Amino acid sequence: MRIITFISLILIFASCKTEVKRFDEPENLIPRDSMVLIMEELTVLESYITTKYPMMHVNEKVMRKSGDAILKKYHISFKRFDESVSYYGSRQDEMQSIYTEVQDSLNWKLNHLQ
């Protein structure tokens, strides 16, 4: 949950200002295509967890552990993820493009399940 909350906060703060502070590209920036895959898995995970565990105090704990497991699957530390989200989040068009690609991919998968 802290991952999704962090991403949401970045997007909220980024949308409130007319000028967003740009972060320098971190040395270990997660490549865009990998970021899309990670964000896609986190989106599906958050959707499942909030449906299965509607009580916030429970779903936050489950989301934290499960989100950490997704990052571990990709061999990505939370620090690296955090820096990459900050970088992409400071480039609103790029972050919006990542979210659009995540949404398109999930819609495609949903349509092909039916």
Image: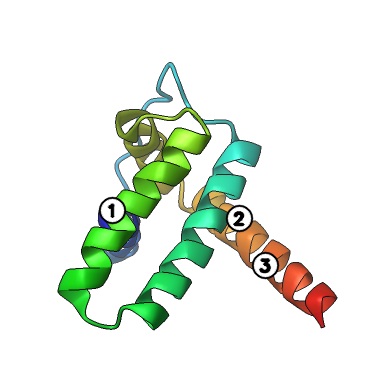
In the image, what residue occupies the spot 37% across and 26% down? 24
Q: Which residue is drawn at the image coordinates 31% and 50% (left, top)? A: 65
Quick check: 66 left or right of 61? right
The tag on residue 106 is 3
Disc 3 on helix, strand or loop? helix
The CA distance from mark 3 to mark 1 is 22 Å
Distance CA(mark 3)–CA(mark 2): 14 Å
**In the rendered structure, which amino acid carries the disc numbered 2?**
Ser
Q: Nearer the viewer, residue 93 or 111?
A: 111
Disc 3 or disc 1, which is closer to the eye?
Answer: 1
Task: Mark yes or no: residue 109 visible.
Answer: yes
| Among the two numbered marks 2 and 1 on one chain, the one whose residue lies closer to the N terminus | 1
Mark 3 surroundings: few (<14), some (14-19) or many (≥20) residues within 10 A: some
Residues marked 2 and 1 touching at CB (< 8 Å): no
Image location (x, y in percent) of residue 88: 45, 42
Under mark 1, the amino acid is Arg
Is 8 drawn above or below residue 91 in the view shown?
below
Q: Earlier in the sequence, mark 3 or mark 1?
A: 1
Residue 109 to residue 96: above or below: below
Residue type at mark 3: give it.
Leu
Pair 3/2: label in front = 3
Q: Secondary structure at mark 2?
A: helix
Residue at numbered disc 1: 64
Label 2, label 1: how many angstroms apart (C-alpha)?
A: 25 Å
Earlier-in-chain disc, 3 versus 2? 2
Secondary structure of residue under mark 1: helix
Per the image, the residue denoted by label 2 is 97
